[in-house]
Structure formats: structure tokens, C-alpha cells
């Protein structure tokens, strides 16, 4: 049993996997990662951490050693990823983006674009030679709505749901339209701009992350929604590099 740990800016996502697939996932706030990580009882024989929060890595490694007695592998571009990297400064690529690129190539092939709906909105582009070549980073959907709530006197905090009308009949409905329909426009325009710069076969577009299902529901440009894509990437990377920690 392998423990998969994806430390994001807002939440830590954990999973248990065997040699073939991800079996179970759960999450908790990243602020708890350095204090009370929420592990489950399991006979874990290996672990891997992908993190975009450097301060959380060392405490998480110590916790995994203490609870499961294994030394976790840390995702980096220096590992055997099974894909190429054609990027001027590869040290700047986040672990989550590497995992998404590995996961999408393994599950769907190349070329591909991953649209990851997290604290930030990230587009990860893999060319037809299965090389990560870059992408786009934009504000996350929840970050945008939270900013409106925090920086205005009258706009409320809203729950992100599919709007019933384009023309909102209340402040909340107007905000839902601006957030959800407006965000689809943002995603579509970025995808169009990326497609213009790519040669050859049109890539498959796969959405993942918290709001992928909501946005993809009425955005045909996103062909698949795969909630486990990052976890699958972590699993594959561990399988390819397990001898380093066994």
C-alpha cells in the first residue's frame, strides 16, 4: 500500500494506492499539515510527497516516518518521470504540475492539456512527444470570489453553483453568473490561445481539481474530468522511482 500526499496551498490531499490504481482519497486543510496531519490506519509500505508549500514538507516527512515507518519520496524534476521536460527553468515547475503531466500522459496519451482548478488555475501543456513545455497560471475561482467578499462592503460570500439565469435577479445570482459563466469564458479564451501556438494533433483537454466538474459541465472544450489525475501522477512517479527508498 502506497501513501500519496499532495500538499496544496489550501488543502492537503492524501490517497492510498496499490500497484494498479488509487484506492481511497481524503483531504484536510494545509494549515494542519505541520501540526495534526490526518492519517488513516493502513499497512503502508511506501510514500510519496508532492508539495507546493515548502514549509510543510519537513513536518510531513517526519509525521510519515513516525506513523508508518517509511521514508517518503519527494517529487522533483530530477526523478524518473517517464515524460520529457522542455522548459527553460525546470526548477520552477511545481510538483503538482509535474504530477498532472505524468498522470495525463499515462491515462490519456499526448499531446494533452491539463486544466487544474485549485487555489490557482493552472494549464499544463504536454506536446506530442510527451514533453512538458509550459502553460498558464491564473487566479483560482474561489480566490476570485473570496477577494470580492473581502474587498467590498456589500457583496456576500457565495457558494459556487450553476447559475439559473445569465441575468441575475439578486446580488447572489449576479455573482454566481459572473463567477461561473465568466470563468468558463476565461478558460475557453486561454485554451484558444494555447491551441494557436501548438503544432500538429490537437491535444486532449482534461480537467481536474475542485471546480473542474462545475466548469466543464457547460464547457465542451474540456473533454474529460478526472478528479484523481494528480494522485495518479504521484502513483506513477512512485512506481518508477521506488528503488530509491526501498
Image (cartoon, rainbow, N blue to C red):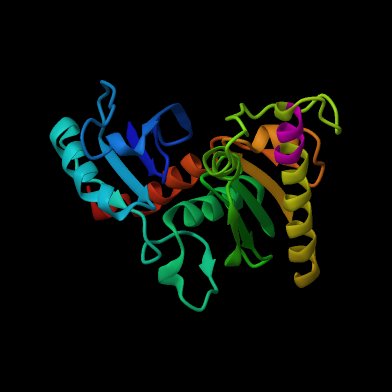
221 inside magenta stretch: no
Residue 13 placement (x, y as % from top left): 41, 35
178 inside magenta stretch: yes
Residue 242 placement (x, y as % from top left): 31, 49
Q: Relative to 32, is 246 above or below?
A: below
Q: Main secondary structure of the magenta part?
A: helix
Query: In the rendered image, which quarter is residue 191 located in?
Result: bottom right
Query: In the rendered image, which quarter is residue 209 located in?
Result: top right
Q: Residue at x 41, y 46 (%)?
A: 9
State the residue in front, 78 or 159: 159
Q: Relative to 34, is 92 above or below?
A: below
State the residue in front, 125 or 150: 150
Q: Residue at x 80, y 60 (%)?
A: 192
Residue 174 placement (x, y as % from top left): 76, 33
Query: In the rendered image, which quarter is residue 122 located in?
Result: bottom right
User: Which residue occupies the extreme bottom position in the image?
Assistant: 88
State the residue in front, 222 or 80: 222
Q: Is residue 134 visible?
A: yes
| The N terminus lies in quadrant | top left
Q: Is residue 162 visible?
A: no
Q: Using residue 172 as the reference point, say whether residue 26 is left or right of it.
A: left
Q: Using residue 195 as the reference point, say whether residue 161 is left or right of it.
A: left
What span is in magenta?
173-179
Q: Using residue 211 as the reference point, say whether residue 189 is left or right of it.
A: right
Q: Residue at x 53, y 36 (%)?
A: 228
Residue 195 placement (x, y as % from top left): 78, 64
Amino acid at each position: 500500500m502506497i501513501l500519496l500526499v499532495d500538499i496544496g496551498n489550501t488543502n492537503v490531499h492524501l490517497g492510498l494506492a496499490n500497484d494498479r490504481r488509487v484506492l481511497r482519497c481524503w483531504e484536510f486543510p494545509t494549515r494542519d499539515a505541520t501540526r495534526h496531519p490526518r492519517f488513516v490506519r493502513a499497512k503502508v509500505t511506501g510514500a510519496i510527497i508532492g508539495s507546493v508549500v515548502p514549509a510543510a514538507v519537513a513536518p510531513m516527512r517526519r509525521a510519515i516516518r513516525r506513523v508508518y515507518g517509511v521514508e517518503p519520496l519527494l517529487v522533483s524534476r530530477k526523478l524518473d518521470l517517464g515524460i520529457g521536460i522542455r522548459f527553460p527553468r525546470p526548477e520552477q515547475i511545481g510538483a503538482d504540475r509535474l504530477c498532472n503531466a505524468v498522470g495525463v500522459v499515462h491515462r490519456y496519451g499526448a499531446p494533452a492539456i491539463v486544466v487544474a482548478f485549485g487555489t490557482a488555475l493552472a494549464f499544463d501543456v504536454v506536446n506530442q512527444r510527451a514533453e512538458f513545455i509550459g502553460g498558464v497560471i491564473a487566479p483560482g475561482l474561489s480566490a476570485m470570489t473570496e477577494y470580492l467578499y473581502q474587498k467590498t462592503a456589500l457583496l456576500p460570500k457565495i457558494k459556487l453553483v450553476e447559475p439559473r439565469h445569465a441575468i441575475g435577479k439578486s446580488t447572489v445570482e449576479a455573482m454566481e453568473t459572473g463567477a461561473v459563466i465568466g470563468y468558463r469564458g476565461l478558460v475557453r479564451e486561454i485554451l484558444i490561445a494555447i491551441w494557436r501556438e501548438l503544432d500538429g494533433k490537437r491535444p486532449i483537454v482534461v480537467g481536474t481539481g475542485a471546480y473542474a466538474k462545475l466548469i466543464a459541465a457547460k464547457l465542451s472544450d474540456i473533454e474529460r474530468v478526472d478528479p484523481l489525475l494528480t494522485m495518479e501522477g504521484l502513483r506513477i512517479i512512485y512506481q518508477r522511482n521506488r528503488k530509491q527508498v526501498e
